[in-house]
Amino acid sequence: MNNVNNDLKFFDNLNLNKKSVCPKCKGKGFIIIEDNTVEHCDCMFSSKEPLLRAMNIPKRYWSIANNQDILNNEGVNQSYTNAYISVLDYVNKFKENSGKGLFLIGPPGVGKTYLSVFLLLYLEEKYKIKGLFYDVRTLIVDLKALIGKDRYADNMNSYDKFLTKIIKSPILVLDDLGSEVLTDYNRDLITYIISSRYNDMRPIVITTNFDLARYDINPKDVGLEDKLATKSNKKKMDMITLKLQNKPFENEQEDVRGKVFSYKDLPNALRGDLALRLGDSIASRLGEMCDFIYIFGQDRRALKGKTKKGT
């Protein structure tokens, strides 16, 4: 029962609808069921929907808003746990005008998007900073759809308003950067967004897909053994998360900080491929703006598909 009480305390701050109290969960957002476990109340989704839509968070990831303990997943390994701690570290040391961001890098399906959404939601919960999430391909399509619209209006047109919103957001997540086809327009657009945020010292969070093994980046070589997190490790992470709700991260123990890498730490071949995929200008700016986090593992989406088929 103590674990249940701890969970409830942890999530107390997440109820965004303080005025109307849900009769089902009494405003907690969670219900204790028969086996002393906790399940989310339906009211949590409805009360947070305006916020999630304003931050452009895809519906698939709305459940993260109701479950900040995102280590409770099958296949979680030490590199993912490290990435999770690194995100907590980043949020708790966050300075809006520092211009410092994160670059999550690894193969598809290892949880990069999940962690980037968690980062946005944790920032909002902790500091009321409302960032923006965008899949890069969707961003390009949305901007192209606005080209020429209201072009001759006296006021700022829709395209400029939207682009300004992206550039001026206090923090921006660009998901799956590099997967889009880099036409001259696409390259110029992404360069403009990143250069503008670079010059204005506005942080950015990037996710991109790379097969790390191709560059001889192995978990053991970078101090992140690729084995499943044990129950004791999971418990330790839970305790770290609870503590972070009440104390600034700077006051925590040194050994709970995540391991991140600078641009110069990346293998030459990976830096070269980043420049080839994104362009020299984008790669150089992101290299200065971001700390890099490696995430290893198998594609969880593929694993889920195999489970459903019974293979």
Image: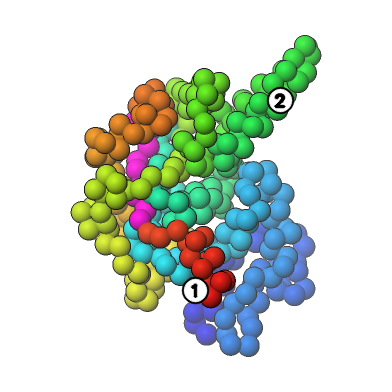
Q: In this view, does 85 lie to the left or right of 73?
A: left
The amino acid at mark 2 is Leu
Q: Which residue shows up at 30% across the image and 31% down it?
A: 272
- Tag of residue 146: 2
Q: What stretch of residues is rendered in magenta?
A: 287-296
The structure residue drawn at horizontal position 40% and vertical position 60%, both measured from the top left corner, is 298
What is the quadrant of residue 157 in the picture? top right
- Residue 301 in view in this figure: yes
Residue 59, position as x, y percentages in the image: 66, 53
Above or below, 138 against 297 in this view is above
Say which amino acid is labelled 1: Thr
In the image, residue 212 sits, relative to residue 62, either above or below, namely: above
Q: What is the C-alpha distance between the residues marked 1 and 2?
A: 46 Å
Residue 287 to residue 19: above or below: above
Indicate which disc, 1 or 2, sits on the residue closer to the N terminus. 2
Q: Where is residue 282 in the image (x, y as percent from the top left)?
A: 41, 27
Magenta-colored stretch includes residue 290: yes
Would you name the residue on which mark 1 appears?
311
The quadrant in which residue 198 appears is top left
